[in-house]
Image (cartoon, rainbow, N blue to C red):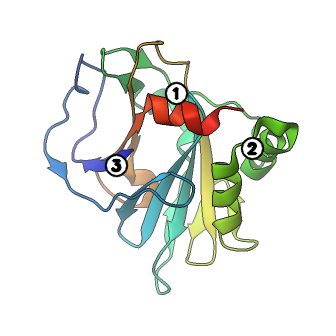
Amino acid sequence: MRAVMVVGLLSGCAAGVPSGRGPVVPVTAGEGGGGGDRVRVGPVEVIAVPVDRSQFMFWVVGRDQTRVTQFRPWSDDVSRLPPMCDEFGNAYPAGVSFLPGTRIRESVGQAISSGSGLPHVREFLDALPPGGALDGPGQVTAAAARGDLLSYPPPAPAAKRMIVRLPAANVGGTGVLTFEFDAARVAAMVAP
């Protein structure tokens, strides 16, 4: 998986490359915390963790003991989010798969306890600050992470890449956060 920060809001998809990709600012990307991509935005890190082939948790974790950042969930207004794209130019609109007020830990926890596995998700959730994993808008500090859960229609069977773009403004940044997922790797991670 690869994470980049793109300057300028992207719209639509084009075969091979998301349209308007434009200048790319390198950011720290890694595979840890259960295989999620990590993008550093000022004092916070945004971590993407696949829950299934077309559903992703996004956690905003404070990395600076001296800073507080305001977080606004992307799921609050999915109509303004760019679609998830694949390398063929297909666009998959963002949606939510949980009821407002439902905690992400509860939603994802049901999938884990139902025997569907997801050890990478369990490992990641266990690594969040104790008692500091919150849903909804509010402050993000080094002691309190906040999460969001976004769903997309399943990608085309031949898709090898899934590209999710989110406005950085929701975490106090500028531009667009771009997460690129290898479809085969995600499918292997979420297989029962």
Could you say whether the residue bearing mark 2 is in a helix, strand or loop? helix
Q: Position of residue 57 (x, y in %)?
A: 59, 45
The extreme left residue here reads: 23
Q: Identify the residue position indicated by label 3 in the image.
A: 3
| Residue 18 vertical placement versus 128 (above, below) | above
In front here: 192 or 1?
192
169 lies left or right of 133: left
* Residue at x 36%, y 63% (from the top left corner): 41
Give the residue type at disc 3: Ala
How many neighbours does mark 2 have within 10 angstroms: few (below 14), some (14-19), or many (20 or more)?
Answer: some
Residue 145 image offset from top left, x and y in percent: 61, 66
Instruction: Give the number of the disc on residue 94.
Output: 1
Q: Residues under labels 2 and 1: Cα distance?
A: 18 Å
CA gap between label 1 and label 3 equals 18 Å
**In terms of secondary structure, where does tag 3 sit?**
strand
Q: Tag 2: residue type? A: Val
The residue indicated by pointer 2 is: 108
Name the residue located 50 percent from the left edge and 85 percent from the top edge. 65
* Residue 26, label in figure: none
Q: Residues within 10 Å of mark 1 (few under 14, many from 20)?
A: many
**Front-most of residues 39 and 93:** 39
Q: In the figure, 45 relative to 141: above or below? A: above
| Nearer-N-terminus badge (1/3) | 3
Judge left or right: residue 84 versus residue 16: right
Looking at the rendered image, the disc whose residue lies closer to the viewer, 2 or 1, is 2
